[in-house]
Amino acid sequence: MEVPLFFCPAFVGIVLFRVRHQVSLSNSHHKLRFAAKNRFFLRLENGNPFKSIRGSFRCSNWIENYPTAPSITQIADAKVIYSVAPAMGHNKESHPECNSRVPAIMNALEKMELTPKFRGSEIIELQSLKPATVDDIASVHAKAYVSGLEKVMDQATEKGLIFIDGSGPTYATATTFQESLLAAGAGISLIDSVVAASKVSHSPPVGFALIRPPGHHAVPKGPMGFCVFGNVAIAARYAQRAHGLKRVFIIDFDVHHGNGTNDAFYDDPDIFFLSTHQDGSYPGTGKIDQSGHGAGEGATLNLPLPGGSGDIAMRTVVDEVIVPCAQRFKPDIILVSAGYDGHVLDPLASLQYTTGTYYMLASSIKELAKDLCGGLCVFFLEGGYNLSSLSYSVADSFHAFLGEPTLAADFDNPAILYEEPSNKVKQAIQKIKHIHSL
Ligand SMILES: *[C@@H]1O[C@H](CO)[C@@H](O)[C@H](O)[C@H]1NC(C)=O
Ligand SMILES: CC(=O)N[C@H]1CO[C@H](CO)[C@@H](O)[C@@H]1O
Ligand SMILES: [Zn+2]
């Protein structure tokens, strides 16, 4: 295999080069083969490979000329800033968490004219991404896990694909370690950008990290449920450490419970974790009475919603739970674990959110950040496994960030919806309001 990305100490200064990434792997049982069509564009500077790489990564469809990094004024004038880390080498055939997810989103953004090419200064793609450092990752995960994962990369290279023990099956390939560092780094870079923009503007752009592998199930001591590193949790710690943003409010609307994020901050009063998820879905954690521990008592809110809950339920949750809870907490920044697997068309769960629900969430959370923390807000891609509902929902979230009307009516088919379990939803909301005195 050929991944000549990280060992070019001879390059001095900044060099732009292109690599065709091609891997073919086999073991005695299966032959695994793929030739990722993506190309890596890396700028290498002299020195330690891990510290010196500024890798900007794009899939071949969107290759254009590279402008120099946007200035702070340019970022401050934008309404959306996104980063792309699609982890093309981290893939398993017919696995829902596959490498076509981010390209599908990019195609939809392109088709709906929601890229910088069509929107000029309103939408910026952050192209100079740094992988997260081991220290960044170790702010959330055990160092032994990080070094252990790096070590098993040899085995993954040899076998093509491995499953990591005890991880509620999470696969790894030869590139998983590096690509997971890049995903976490793509989130961190957005934190830097929106914070810098907020110093010169009262309405900095909303950030969106279009990254994988996802992160919210990854627990401090290991990977779990398709997730390798807790991207949102790592970004929360980074925001505190690098920018003095002490109080972080994390909203997780993925259909599954973000148990990794939950565990990372369970006894931390400064990081509020609020998760809505389908009751009884993977991994079965996030019960309504799990509300934090010790000094962090009350700074975790878990709201399991009954199967079939949809747009009406989520609108009520926003008004009666998310908004009052954030207002009371008074965050310095809002981070979002944005999973799109609660969509009615998603194959992995059975909630009934629609494109319109995701537009409403994006728009409400953006307003909340504007009211409470100078507009500081970054979304992180988590789940979402129907490529079309995933990509249209992300695109319509962009419309919300731009302050433009929703196009949900073009995508949503009300005929496939059935009646929401409104009594059960009402009971769950009453109960959570009681537990958290909302
Ligand atoms: C995704 O949604 C489309 C409708 O937009 C549907 O035709 C397709 O079967 C769905 N795919 C999966 C994997 O659920
Ligand atoms: C909140 C919670 O129950 N978290 C669990 C997430 O999964 C890990 C690994 O199985 C458990 O150790 C945690 O207790
Ligand atoms: Zn999920």
Image (cartoon, grey):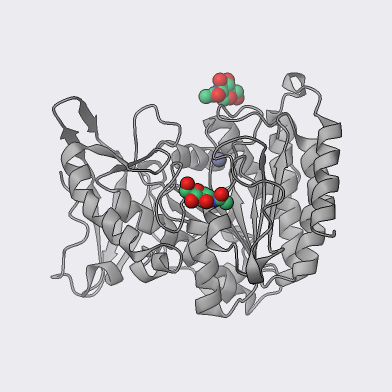
User: Which residue is most to the front?
Assistant: 294
Q: Nearer the viewer, residue 336 or 13?
A: 336
Q: Position of residue 168 (x, y in %)?
A: 43, 40
Q: Position of residue 160 (x, y in %)?
A: 22, 37
> Does residue 36 appear to the left or right of 384 in the view shown?
left
| In this rendering, position of residue 169 left or right of residue 292 | left
Q: Quadrant of residue 307?
A: top right
Above or below — where is 221 with respect to 282?
below
Say which quarter of the image contains residue 124.
bottom right
Task: State which image quarter holds ligand 3.
Answer: top right
Q: Residue furthest top?
A: 415
Foreground residue, 392 or 177? 177
On the image, the x and y values in percent for residue 348 come to 55, 30
Q: Would you say residue 124 is visible in this rendering? A: no
Quick one: 200 or 270, which is closer to the camera? 270
Q: Is residue 296 above or below residue 353?
A: below
Q: In this image, 318 relative to 336: left or right? A: right
Rendered-image quadrant of the C terminus? bottom right
